[in-house]
Image: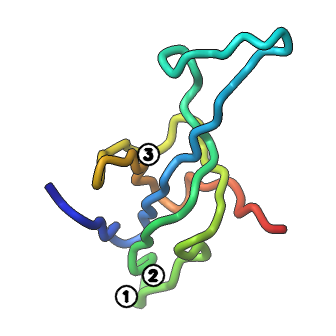
Amino acid sequence: MAKSVEPLYERVAVEPLEQEEKTQGGIIIPDTVKDKPIRGTVVAVGCGYRSDDGKILPLMVKVGDLVTYAKWGGNEIELNGKKVVILKESDILAVMRD
């Protein structure tokens, strides 16, 4: 099993934030029926986009950024016992800042 991940080009690896969901009445919604998480922490980034003239343009996100991404974007993999989503930077909707 791989110990690290290195996304290619404009791809980003995001570790989804698991959030316990409760209804207003206090009922906990089990993982099996919850929507896929849409926030996570960037754990790795690719080298960037290749422009029409062949130059590599860097990505806007960096390791450690808290991001919101498209609900059904990316592909889930398991890395060191944790779920990681590999997605294109264009699937990231926003970087969450303080």
Front residue of this view, candidates 32 and 85 = 32
Sequence-wise, the earlier of marks 2 and 3 is: 2
Q: Nearer the viewer, mark 3 or mark 1?
A: 3
C-alpha gap between disc 2 and disc 3: 22 Å
Which residue occupies 40% across, 53% down? 86
Which residue occupies 62% across, 41% down? 38
Q: Which residue is mark 3?
A: 74
In what element is the residue under mark 2? Answer: loop
Image location of residue 50, percent across then percent down: 40, 79
Label 1 is placed on what type of residue? Gly
Q: Is residue 82 above or below residue 95?
A: above
In what element is the residue under mark 1? Answer: loop
Density class for disc 2 (Cα within 10 Å; few <14, some 14-19, many ≥20) is few
Front residue of this view, candidates 48 and 5 = 5
Tell me whether circle 1 and circle 2 mark residues in contact (CB < 8 Å).
Answer: yes
Label 3 is placed on what type of residue? Gly
Which label was assigned to residue 51?
Answer: 2
Image location of residue 90, percent across then percent down: 56, 58
Left or right: 69 in relation to 14: right
Q: Which residue is mark 1?
A: 54
Quadrant of the image occupied by residue 52: bottom left
Q: Is residue 4 above or below residue 86?
A: below
In what element is the residue under mark 3? Answer: loop
